[in-house]
Amino acid sequence: MAMLTAEQVSFCYQGKHETVYAVKEFDYDFEPGFFYAIVGKSGSGKTTLLSLLAGLELPTQGQVRFQGTATTQMDGDRYRRDHAAVIYQNFNLFPQLTALENAMYPLRLQKVSKQEAAQRAEEALTQVGLSPAQLRRYPSHLSGGEQQRVAIARTVATRCEIILADEPTGSLDEENTRGITDLLLRLTHEENRCVIVVTHDLSIAARADAVLELRDGRLQPHQESFKE
Ligand SMILES: Nc1ncnc2c1ncn2[C@@H]1O[C@H](COP(=O)(O)OP(=O)(O)O)[C@@H](O)[C@H]1O
Ligand SMILES: [Mg+2]
């Protein structure tokens, strides 16, 4: 069984004066051990699709299923806490917590002991290239790129089966982008996670196991899977 399945998923934003059909009849099986890049022009529905896969939005039509269970039937907070970690575009770090405390936070929600949470958070923050001194800093004392790496480390440390990310390297230079992509690919292939990344960066898309292109809310048919 696929890890995450979208069955003919459509989503529309219902405004006062207009209805925007942001995702149209999206049908796809996401497998563990695959790194997916979602590409497409601005406004093509990428962020909306990611929100649907994260259970932050529920389909207007169709279903998103995690291991067979529809997101409409589950507690979204619990799903994101235990199974589908999200890296938000604006990072969503807690300003009053240090980098280390930010990365520990979801683990504490998962009821991981304080000691183990600190150890796993530190390991993940080191993997994304932060120094011991930076671990003790508050987000306001970190650069945009460093904050982005804290946000990435926070999801890595959770051991969730699925990682969903909207432009996870948007604030990073080329070298850090390569490093983060290396890390996400390693998690995908060594830990059999399912990593789904919205990106504009062709250097990331080129390294993905599969590239999904959205155009005007629709998955383009020429999809290729590069992995055997
Ligand atoms: N909250 C919203 N209300 C109304 N329309 C929205 C909202 N968010 C996004 N949209 C529209 O839905 C479409 C898809 O948006 P989005 O998923 O953000 O695309 P992308 O991430 O590819 O830029 C766009 O036409 C956008 O204007
Ligand atoms: Mg977007």
Image (cartoon, rainbow, N blue to C red):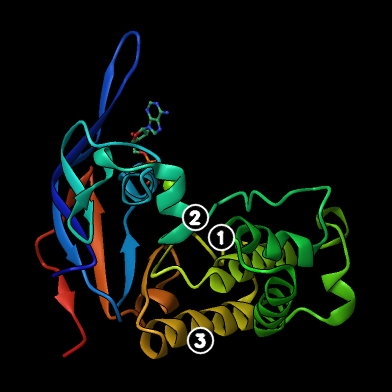
- Is residue 165 at all visible to an observer of this figure? no
Mark 1 vs mark 3: give the one in front.
1
Residue marked by disc 3: 182
Picture residue at 34% right of the left edge, 68% below the top: 37
Which residue is located at x 40 percent, y 61 percent? 83
Question: In terms of secondary structure, where does tag 3 sit?
Answer: helix
Find disc 1 in the rendering and name its residue: 110
In the rendered structure, which amino acid carries the disc numbered 3? Asp
Q: Nearer the viewer, residue 187 or 142?
A: 187
Q: CA distance from mark 2 to mark 1?
A: 7 Å
The residue tagged with tag 1: helix, strand or loop? loop
Where's the C terminus, which quadrant?
bottom left
Give the mark nearer the N terminus: 1 vs 3.
1
Q: Residue at x 38, y 42 (%)?
A: 75
Residue 25, percent from left and from top: 12, 44
The structure residue drawn at horizontal position 56% and vertical position 60%, both measured from the top left corner, is 110
Location of residue 36 (image quadrant): bottom left
Q: CA distance from mark 1 to mark 3?
A: 26 Å
Q: Residues within 10 Å of mark 3 (few under 14, many from 20)?
A: some
Q: Which residue is mark 2?
A: 81
Q: Which of the two marks, 2 or 1, is nearer to us in this view?
A: 1
